[in-house]
Image (cartoon, grey):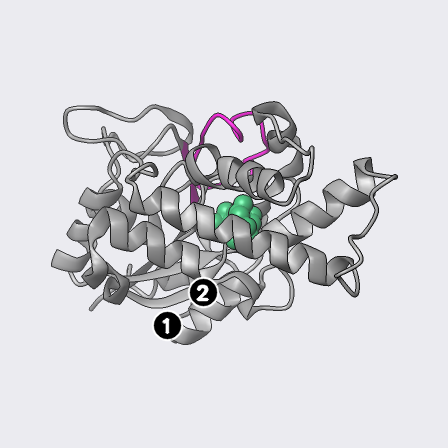
Amino acid sequence: MPPKNQLKALIFDVDGTLAETERDGHRPAFNQAFSDAGLDWHWSEERYGELLEVSGGKERIRAFVQQSQPNFKLPSEFADLTEFIKQLHATKTKYYKQYAAEGKIPLRPGVERLLNEAREQGVRLAIATTTTPANVQALLENTLGAASLHWFEVIAAGDMVPHKKPAPDIFEYALKHLDLPPENCLGFEDTNNGLLSATQTGLKTIVTINDYTREQDFSKATLVISDFGEPNAPFKVLAGNAHSAQYFDIDLARAICEA
Ligand code: XBP
């Protein structure tokens, strides 16, 4: 008789979890879009790290204008700031997709191995991300191939939900489409915002840290690791019980989910 909390699905965040997209894709794409628009805005790595507190690229631009561009003048061809941001963000997405197509946004360690193990062992897959759906498609197509889009039963992304992370909406959307309760799934995140979003739904959540997020509060995480690791490149365990594993695989996922 399988346990009530049998592992049935993995739900992945994208940015910072599947790939270092903020560093390798989004930040340079924002800066290129600003330059194309004739704006003297440039988000340094440090400034971008601060702005990442705001989920959502459009929301991030708005927060930046309101926080630090008091003299910003809306160009006359736009009816309002929302329309201006929408066009600026569309340009940014164009550049992000270009960088992905140029192979500039590789997957993090262990991601491809873990996804393939899940598929081989019949563990279902889903995505829950704040980023724009087109960005998810570009990342998956250019790292795992076009067929990988069908590995995920649901790709919950961006404006599909009214409230972005840390609100639980996007993980709730993914669970609803999987038609599974949280106790049969694990969430994977890299930020405190994402961890709050996932854990509010009741998901046990694993955090893989990165340079932007290593100082954040991950006290609600079930396990905090440096990355998913590989058999020849073990991960570092920063918090939680890794059950003596040297890298994150389906056996470890099962041990955590069914504990
Ligand atoms: C991270 C985000 C996104 C990206 C930028 O999403 O907050 O806004 O930074 O993508 P997650 P967009 O960690 O949930 O994957 O510009 O398309 O929003």
Mark 1 secondary-structure assignment: helix
- Please state which of residues 188 and 243 is positioned toward the viewer in this rendering: 188
Residue that mark 2 sits on: 156
Residue 198 on image: x %, y % = 51, 54
Q: In this view, does 183 lie above or below 215?
A: below
Quadrant that contains the N terminus: bottom left
Residue 178, which numbered label?
1
- Residue drawn at 66 percent across, 37 percent down: 51
- Residue drawn at 79 percent across, 62 percent down: 80
Residue 107 on image: x %, y % = 29, 40
Q: Label the magenta part by its dominant secondary structure.
A: loop
Magenta part of the chain: 205-224
Left or right: where 103 falls relative to 83: left
Crowd around label 2: few <14 · some 14–19 · many ≥20 (10 Å): many
Left or right: where 17 falls relative to 248: right
Crowd around label 1: few <14 · some 14–19 · many ≥20 (10 Å): some
Structural distance between the alpha carbons of marks 1 and 2? 11 Å
Left or right: where 205 falls relative to 200: left
Q: In this view, does 7 lie above or below 240?
A: below
Residue farthest toward the left in the current orientation of the protein: 120
Q: Is residue 101 magenta?
A: no
Closer to the observer: label 1 or label 2? 2
Left or right: where 161 falls relative to 241: right
Circle 1/circle 2 CB separation < 8 Å: no
Name the residue type under label 2: Ala
